[in-house]
Image (tube, helix red, strand yellow):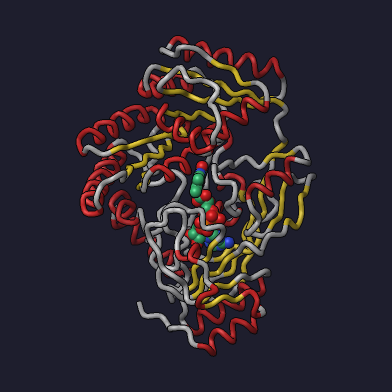
Amino acid sequence: MHYKKLTQADIDHLKSILSSERVYVGDQILEDYAHDELAEIKVFPDVVLEPETTEEVANIMKFASEHHIPVTPRGSGTGLCGAAVPKEGGILLITTRMNKVFEIDEENLMAVVQPGVILLNFIETVTKLGLMYPPDPGEKSATLGGNVMTNAGGMRAVQYGVTRDYVEGMEVVLPDGEVIELGGKVVKNSSGYSLKDLIIGSEGTLGIITKLTLRLVPMPKKQVSLLIPYASLDDAIDTVPKIINAKLVPTAIEFMERDVINAATEYLGKVFPDSSAPAYLLLTFYGNSKSELEEVYEQAAQVCLQNKAFDVLIANTKERQDSIWETRGTFLEALKAMSHLEECDVVVPRNKVAEFVKFTDGLEEKYDIRIRSFGHAGDGNLHIYILKDELVEEIWQTKRLAVMDEMYQRAKELKGQVSGEHGIGTAKKPYLHDSLGLIQIELMRKIKASFDPLNILNPGKVV
Ligand SMILES: Cc1cc2nc3c(=O)[nH]c(=O)nc-3n(C[C@H](O)[C@H](O)[C@H](O)COP(=O)(O)OP(=O)(O)OC[C@H]3O[C@@H](n4cnc5c(N)ncnc54)[C@H](O)[C@@H]3O)c2cc1C
């Protein structure tokens, strides 16, 4: 599709909407804005805009739709599939100045915020009030808008669900500049098609979120983490369905391997609390009393010990828990520091996690390439990384594509889905199309066309 190339007159008009210090062109545009954390796909926008209000966003979109200029929304740019890259140039609309927490409504357990609020700041704000925002994706510098647009998951999904489960309402600027309100401070809603749920996870292709109403829960009073060493990753992962089958609901179940732990401790310059095993499960339980927690975690410990665990190490102080979770939170950064890599973020039924990980071990041998994995074993969402190491570009590309094809094919056979939490962007588009098939993709394209008939909002992504 051909879009209008921005002229000086267009830039001047945008400066009249925003004031010139929030409009960046030419050398003022940082290299960071040409990519996200995937960094594989790089395209510079023609202009970067930093709106602060809904009205400014609406005026930008009116202007863009009248002049057929592509607009790519961006939060913090921590995405992992190229979704915030301005593939067609045009306007990059950054939301990080839309960072107001308007209200924490403790009577309704809701927060009303702008989309550019940083997750970490939001967590700190609600924690001070004894409240919790349950979605817990690893990258805390992401924006709440970016989290909603990717339907971010994270560590606590086993017990609490994902971002979608905590979005009750939103204000959205449509591609033509109209502003709509969806949902609100209500905990139930059966009022027609849920446009709100269509927008969640749509990666900035249907509208721009300018306000969010998010559900909060009381902060549980106690938490404990168990670090459980195993002789192999297979043994560790094989235990997960048994924990679930024992009707225990941990808040988080993560698996991790020695290599990845070593990379993270080296990266952090810190020591991991245990060095006895090649693989671990990490379980966390939340509860409101010591006795309630003890009963559940002791049962979980028994299940693990009956299933080849060497030991169960209990982290019941904040310091110990923080040290383990800090290491877990650094895995991706540590792998990235070690080698260029490609990510696969599939989700499979929880009782297929072990089978899928064993399959990727086989690929490591078959293609003679390093593959490392960690992930949310409790919800079936795996993060598998193919490492380029010293491979020359041509061989890397050939091996990378072959391994990715095999992994997505296997995930499909196991009735899994292409992305558990990172989304599709441009990087995962071919796999999505293959996984869902033409009928579903055509339905999605019709939805896109009814929101955005001119295809100006984040073109080229998802569908
Ligand atoms: C080290 C690391 C760990 C991570 N761990 C996790 C994890 O555990 N779980 C997880 O789910 N993700 C994780 N991520 C991925 C990433 O942090 C999430 O995808 C996050 O939700 C992106 O938020 P962002 O503000 O950076 O959005 P961006 O990357 O800027 O944008 C993401 C998408 O949202 C759109 N968008 C952003 N704001 C708006 C808006 N207001 N309106 C419309 N569209 C908008 C963009 O166009 C783009 O399509 C991790 C990333 C890194 C680097």
Residue 197 seen by the camera: no
On screen, 433 above or below 295? below
Q: Is residue 166 left or right of residue 334?
A: right
Name the quarter where the C terminus is drawn. Answer: bottom left
Check the image and name the residue furthest to the bottom: 9
Residue, x 49% and y 19% (percent of image)? Answer: 228
* Total tally of numbered discs in the picture: 0
Q: Nearer the viewer, residue 248 or 252?
A: 252
On screen, 355 above or below 128? above
Residue, x 41% and y 39% (percent of image)? Answer: 383
Residue, x 47% and y 83% (percent of image)? Answer: 6
On screen, 383 above or below 69? above
Residue 36 seen by the camera: yes
Q: Is residue 245 left or right of residue 286?
A: left
The picture places residue 435, in percent across and down from the top left corner, at 30, 49
The picture places residue 347, in percent across and down from the top left corner, at 40, 39
Q: Nearer the viewer, residue 125 or 62?
A: 125
